[in-house]
Image (spheres, rainbow, N blue to C red):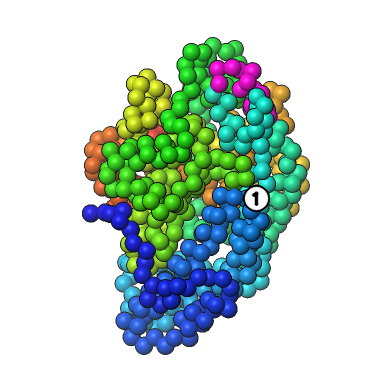
């Protein structure tokens, strides 16, 4: 039913050889769409298709600029090309985009559009019109550039261990060493390196907070949090739901986290579990190494996905053929990992920083889930239909982590290692919740108190961090590191308020896994059917199609945590 034989959308409105180099070149297309006479339903449908094509071409150009820059943050020309788009192209598109949105919504023929098919699309356009302010255009352009500066700063961070230089991502492999002194050395060197740029990163964040707050004030909101909820299209839940999630994590997740870490302490045979012990195994147990090098990672991932469902493996094969993968960590590469949908080409791009560790396997299947989502949504007729809510996007990736576990024997031919890998994954499913709650609650505080000082921010961070910290790990003597820990989370800089989605989606992914344990093929059918809808349905409807209920109340969280706990046992 589904195919990875994805085709680039054929151009019918723009010239096939069109390449975006300057504003003067692309403006005539926006102007023509704005001025075009639409006198019958067929003409309206064609107008929507032409606009969708223009959006796809411009969007993909912007994506490639960002991809190339994050792959090589030391290349000034790539950084300049990205900044040029942010400062010279995107700001000029925004007034036209607002005009096109109004043209459609105010047109008499808009009523003729299929209400079910276009409901979420038109709802998003109305939201965009409500939020558009001319005076925000230069602020948003500056923010787009500033947000990427975080990757430029952190991409240069390296440490020297045993006489050799490593990126911070590569250096984390030493946290799996049997040598406790080496683990401690690596941990402290990573944290010390972050402290070197602490003030520069803090200053960057100060600037972003003020620009975001001004954006909100210009749009009539009291604070950026309320503006951002609207901008992110959070139509189906509120800040109060987030607060309830925070409370549920404290009540129902932290006790299980304490059990996991106490078990780890006993297994290592240490009097006190320290932060550099969390990823370690007892003496004589080798660290999990699921692959060596990016070629082996992609080939094993394809084999794993093929076993789950051949279509999933085909998606990775297609991306590999198109050279839409950059997987290994290296100096000068931005941190983190992402799957970037490409609206015109169809096959997305996966970026990550693999160093041969267990967490890299998890990242690969996670981003692979996002990639499958991109493939499934690509056939939808309009670019706007493919802009799905982040909450369902993260269900796609996190459920794939859990689905794929049944076939991790591709990475581990030893049964004991395979069991350890699955245990590691399930522990991660649980232990990530307190961090999600910490980051989310911190953001609420930051933007509810936009005039805070750095000292006030540090104090608030430490209080919130303590609120969601386990009672097993001993952090004594590490107060300066702990106070600066928020700076490692790139979402705070690049995609503000995008983090609670991971918590909501993790719950959805656990729900999908429960289905999968009962009936694997039905669960995978539900998964594909929901993802193929893109953003054409509301979040509750997408969850319903996936066989889930859109509910992250304390009672639901308690039930799902008990299920994971029983699977771990």
Quarter holding the N terminus?
bottom left
Viewer-side residue, 195 vs 307: 307
Residue at 45% of width from left, 27% of height from top?
289
Picture coordinates of residue 273 (x, y %)? 58, 19
The number of numbered discs placed on residues in the rendered structure image is: 1
> Quick check: is 185 in the magenta stretch?
yes
Residue at 47% of width from left, 19% of height from top?
286
Q: Name the side, left or right, on which 481 lies relative to 389.
A: right
Residue 413 in view (yes/no)? yes
Q: Name the side, left or right, on which 504 lies relative to 275.
A: left
Quarter holding the C terminus?
top left
Viewer-side residue, 484 vs 127: 484
The answer to whether residue 463 is above or below residue 91 is: above
- Prevalent SS, magenta region: helix
Instruction: Give the magenta-colored segment's residue range.
Output: 177-191
**Residue at label 1?**
74
Residue at 48% of width from left, 22% of height from top?
287
**Quadrant of res 466:** top right
Residue at 31% of width from left, 32% of height from top?
406
The answer to whether residue 175 is above or below residue 218 is: above
Picture coordinates of residue 103 (x, y %)? 46, 80
Picture coordinates of residue 138 (x, y %)? 66, 68
Viewer-side residue, 414 vs 517: 414
Picture coordinates of residue 230 (x, y %)? 53, 60
> Quick check: is 200 in the magenta stretch?
no
Q: Name the side, left or right, on which 266 lies relative to 371.
A: right
**Quadrant of res 13:** bottom left
């Amino acid at each position: 039913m589904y195919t990875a034989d994805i085709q680039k959308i054929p151009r019918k409105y723009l010239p096939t050889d069109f390449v975006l180099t300057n504003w003067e070149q692309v403006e005539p297309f926006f102007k023509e769409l704005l001025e075009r006479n639409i006198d019958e339903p067929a003409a309206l449908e064609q107008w929507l298709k032409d606009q969708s094509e223009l959006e796809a071409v411009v969007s993909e150009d912007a994506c490639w600029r960002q991809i190339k820059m994050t792959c090589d943050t030391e290349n000034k020309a790539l950084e300049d090309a990205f900044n040029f788009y942010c400062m010279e192209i995107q700001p000029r598109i925004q007034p036209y985009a607002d005009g096109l949105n109004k043209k459609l919504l105010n047109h008499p023929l808009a009523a003729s559009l299929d209400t079910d098919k276009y409901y979420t699309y038109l709802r998003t356009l109305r939201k965009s019109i409500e939020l558009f302010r001319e005076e925000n255009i230069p602020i948003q352009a500056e923010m787009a550039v500033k947000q990427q500066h975080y990757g430029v700063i952190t991409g240069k961070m390296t440490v020297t261990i045993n006489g050799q230089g490593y990126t911070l991502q590569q250096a984390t492999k030493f946290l799996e060493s049997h040598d406790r002194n080496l683990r401690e050395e690596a941990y402290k060197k990573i944290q010390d390196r972050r402290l070197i740029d602490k003030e520069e990163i803090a200053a960057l964040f100060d600037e972003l907070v003020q620009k975001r707050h001004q954006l909100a004030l210009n749009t009539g909101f009291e604070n950026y949090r309320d503006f951002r909820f609207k901008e992110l299209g959070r139509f189906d839940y509120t800040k109060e739901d987030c607060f309830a999630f925070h409370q549920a994590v404290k009540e129902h997740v932290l006790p299980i986290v304490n059990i996991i870490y106490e078990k780890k302490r006993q297994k290592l045979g240490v009097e006190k579990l320290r932060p550099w012990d969390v990823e370690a195994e007892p003496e004589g147990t080798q660290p999990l190494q699921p692959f060596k090098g990016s070629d082996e990672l992609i080939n094993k991932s394809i084999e794993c996905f093929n076993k789950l469902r051949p279509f999933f493996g085909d998606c990775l094969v297609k991306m590999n053929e198109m050279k839409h993968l950059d997987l290994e960590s290296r100096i000068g590469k931005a941190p983190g990992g992402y799957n970037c949908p490409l609206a015109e080409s169809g096959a997305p791009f996966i970026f990550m920083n693999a160093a041969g560790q267990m967490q890299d396997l998890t990242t690969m299947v996670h981003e692979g889930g996002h990639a499958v989502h991109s493939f499934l949504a690509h056939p939808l007729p309009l670019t706007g239909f493919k802009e799905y809510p982040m909450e369902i996007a993260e269900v796609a990736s996190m459920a794939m982590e859990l689905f794929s576990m049944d076939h991790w024997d591709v990475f581990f031919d030893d049964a004991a290692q395979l069991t350890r890998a699955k245990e590691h994954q399930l522990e991660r499913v649980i232990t990530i919740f307190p961090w999600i709650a910490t980051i989310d609650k911190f953001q609420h505080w930051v933007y509810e108190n936009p005039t805070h000082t750095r000292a006030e921010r540090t104090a608030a961070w430490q209080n919130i961090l303590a609120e969601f910290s386990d009672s097993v790990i001993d952090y004594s003597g590490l107060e300066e590191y702990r106070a600066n820990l928020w700076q490692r989370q790139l979402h705070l800089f690049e995609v503000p308020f995008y983090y609670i989605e991971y918590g909501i989606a993790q719950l959805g992914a656990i729900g999908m896994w429960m289905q999968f344990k009962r009936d694997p093929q039905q669960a995978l059918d539900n998964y594909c059917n929901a993802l193929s809808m893109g953003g054409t349905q509301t979040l509750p409807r997408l969850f319903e199609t996936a066989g889930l209920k859109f509910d992250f109340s304390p009672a639901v969280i308690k039930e799902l945590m008990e299920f994971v706990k029983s699977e771990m046992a």
